[in-house]
Image: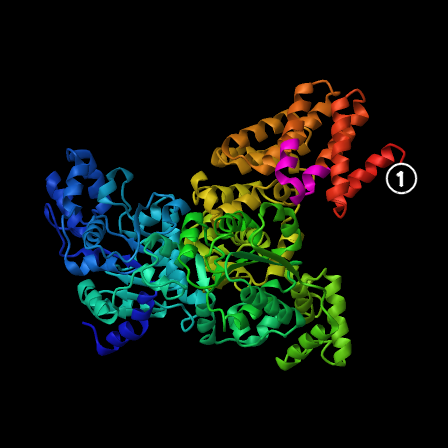
Amino acid sequence: MLTQSDLDVISETLAPLVRSAEISLLLGSGFSIGNKSIQGEVPGSDALKMAILEKCGKQAGARTTLKDAYVLGDREIPDFGEFLRSLFTVESVPTWQQRIFAYAWRRIYTTNIDNVLEVACKQQQRLGRLGADFNFFNYLDASLSSESIGSVPVVSIHGSCSRLGDGFIFSSLEYAMATAKVHDWHRDLAARALTGGLLVVGNQLEESDLDAYIADRSITYGQDDAPRNWLVTPDPDPIKLENYRAAGYHVFDATAEEFFLALYSAAEPKTMADIVLETIPSVAGAVRSQRAMTWFRTAMDPVITSIEQAHAEKGLLRHFLTGDEPEWFYIVNNAYAPTSRDTELTRTIGDSMNSNATGVGVLHVIGPSGSGKTTCIRVALEKVARSNPYIYEFKNGGAIDLDLLRETISRFTGKSIFVFYSAHEFYYAISYISDHFGKSQTPFCLFILEDRVGDYKRNRAQLRRPTVSSVFELAELSVPDAKSIAQKIEAHGLVFDNFSDLPLDRRAKLIVDKERGYGGDLLTTLFSLTTHENFEAKIYQDYVSIRNAAALEALEAVSIVNALGFNVPVHYAAGFIDISQSAFQELVSKELAGVLVYMKEGGYVRCRHKIIAKYYFEQCISKQGSSSLILKILRFLSRQFTVADIRHHPLPYRIYKEIVSFEFLFGSYFAQESRLTSTEMVYHEAQKLFGRDGIFWLHFGRFYRKTDRLDEAIECFRTGLTYFDSFQTNHQLGVALLERYASEGFIDKQDYEEGIEILEAERASRATADPFPTGTMIHWLRKIVAGDQDNEDAASRLKNAISYGMKHFQDDQFVRDQIRDYFSMNGRA
């Protein structure tokens, strides 16, 4: 029975989280008790076992399990599937179960195999008051982005009577643990339980990963620091109750019906649209799509909300200056050192918002890795948000849906700002929005795009010109800014050898010199100060001291993905090395304690600092990589998206694209002496997983081109173009054709003509916006003219390309180099 204390927890803690769609549900047999099927009451595990044995005319032995009964029934009961369906199929449900679907949840999981939730959803849908767009999955389904974007997944993690052919996983811990495959939805659920916000109703948490998770969770976080979860069960066993509480659960002694009726009284239903409309500039009712609102809620973080939540957090501010991530907690508490960069960026954003009424603007914020771009942006946003509250940060693990983004922005009645970090992956989306709203009367929308300088320069040609566009590049640290940093270090009470005892001017000069020595990497500069300049030796020792093979493989996988610029969801990390969530959790709690850390907000695992991940990769992994590990990672990622998902650029696709790249595998990862065979072996195996992805064939072809197998390279490029008409793949095909033409003695004119046609089309499409196609054309025509002096067409095209380059691209170094080499070849200065 619920106590007054329980009711207070429901109204003061749970209800606000339910109203903001922050809760995931896990429902067990206690939720379905009392529901009526065709055969009578929906059975629990023991009742199912007895029903099967009775149908077979058998008696249960002392050690007969549900699995035993199931195997017997499958052999002896005619149409066994239909028998099971009759036991678990209901035609209607009571109102209290139906009302669950009037609310917006992050996820709904069930260990039940009945169809109670499907019927409940349909009943609520007939009333026209669904809390979100719900999509049903079975445990064997891959957790694909295309299926869950814009919807709330409802997952049957043990199977469903609606899909008897998929089979079942029974509640028995022994049987579940014996299951050979660790399914992705199971990892996803275990990750939700680990990171908090899980409401468990009518389930004893004895299934598979969850039972081991209960034992390990308090080790991971410490009893007082564990993210909160809640569990509802009547008359709990005293020992279980103690274990639940130790693992961070508040336990309600109540039936499912009693609990939900109390929750409904404390929290009125709010749809996903209602929740999101509170954070966007739109009139109520203008945005009616639950799918659009669900996507927006899962993909975007309102900065105002992040600031409010950060004000409530507690922690050590000094950790920011020792290299911690620029979380909002540090920004709102002024843990950073104010610099002229912050002031200038704040002014730039403010001017853009004040001087534009409609259209789309783009502000690129670029600089070296670790230069403080994210800090600078968030410091500016914290100030700008006081007068422009509709600011949103795209979540690291989110996926883009162009139609839903367009639909949401189209309803905005006020100006807005969208922030993308490592934004070059999403230039295509910003171009789409720019094309759609650039000349419309929609209130001004500013996209702030953070990138490393190299990523920006390589990809900027993809971004079509918006209404307003500018670039803010973080300049070298000035002496006044360095003084501000030195003073902030002192204000935080940090004392460093050979630094803190120096005069302020000397400290500032030391910071400036170090920052320039690290190529503008301020993060590494500060970290080196805090560890007395021997941090590389310490990091190396942390790595080589790990003896457990599984722990080392886990560290390598997380380090690789971190170094590529991504945080790793905890269930991805377990999936990368093909172990259960609880086994991975044990590694992090023991062998990798202090080496890998959980980020409770967002449910990620990462190395302690970005520079540590980068160091691990460059010094301990690069040039000695394992093809076995890479293939494990790729196999896991292949289950997280399909070709149809690629247009959304979900997190697993973004990780996959970096790992499968020619630069990573051949250029960075494998040892010099083995990279030829190892890279080819990975591509050979990966084609079975990603054979319908054009980007995969682009990189496979680049590998063959690099190793002088032009026939295979050209075949790869042509294959890739059948799946995706990519600028990069077309470019590589054109170049490979000209390269083959030259390498085979300028004989096959068909290669020449096709190659030229492709590259000329590229030049025409890019025109004056991109110098690279013109530079490439000059480079290859120069080689062809030198080796095939009778090719008048090549000579004419070369002169035309040089003239065009001199007229339009005088400032581009690549084009200038090609023109200089041409004149040098022809004896002109």
Is residue 733 toward the left or the right of residue 253 in the image?
right
**Percent position (x, y) of residue 556?**
57, 52
- Magenta highlight range: 760-775
Where does residue 206 sit, x and y in percent of width and height? 30, 57
Please, what is the three-letter code of the amino acid marked with disc 1? Ala
Mark 1 residue element: loop
Query: Does the image show residue 545?
Result: no
- Horizontal side of residue 771 vs 49, given as left or right: right
Kindly identify which residue carries mark 1. Answer: 829
The image shows residue 353, relative to residue 675, as above or below, that is below
Mark 1 packing: few (<14 Cα in 10 Å), some, or many (20+)?
Answer: few
Q: Is residue 116 magenta?
A: no
Colouring of the image: rainbow
Q: Quadrant of the N terminus?
A: bottom left
Image quadrant holding the C terminus, namely top right
Determine the image quadrant of residue 15: bottom left
Above or below: residue 760 compared with residue 810:
above
Residue 494 falls in image quadrant: bottom right
Asked whether residue 64 is in view, the answer is yes
Q: Is residue 304 above or below residue 761?
A: below
Q: Nearer the viewer, residue 726 or 177?
A: 726
x then y, percent, for residue 385: 50, 70
**Count of numbered marks:** 1
In this rendered view, identify the residue nearer to me: 104 or 598: 104
Q: Nearer the viewer, residue 263 or 243?
A: 263
Q: Nearer the viewer, residue 464 or 367?
A: 464
What secondary structure predominates along the stretch shown in magenta?
helix
Residue 783: x percent and y percent?
78, 29
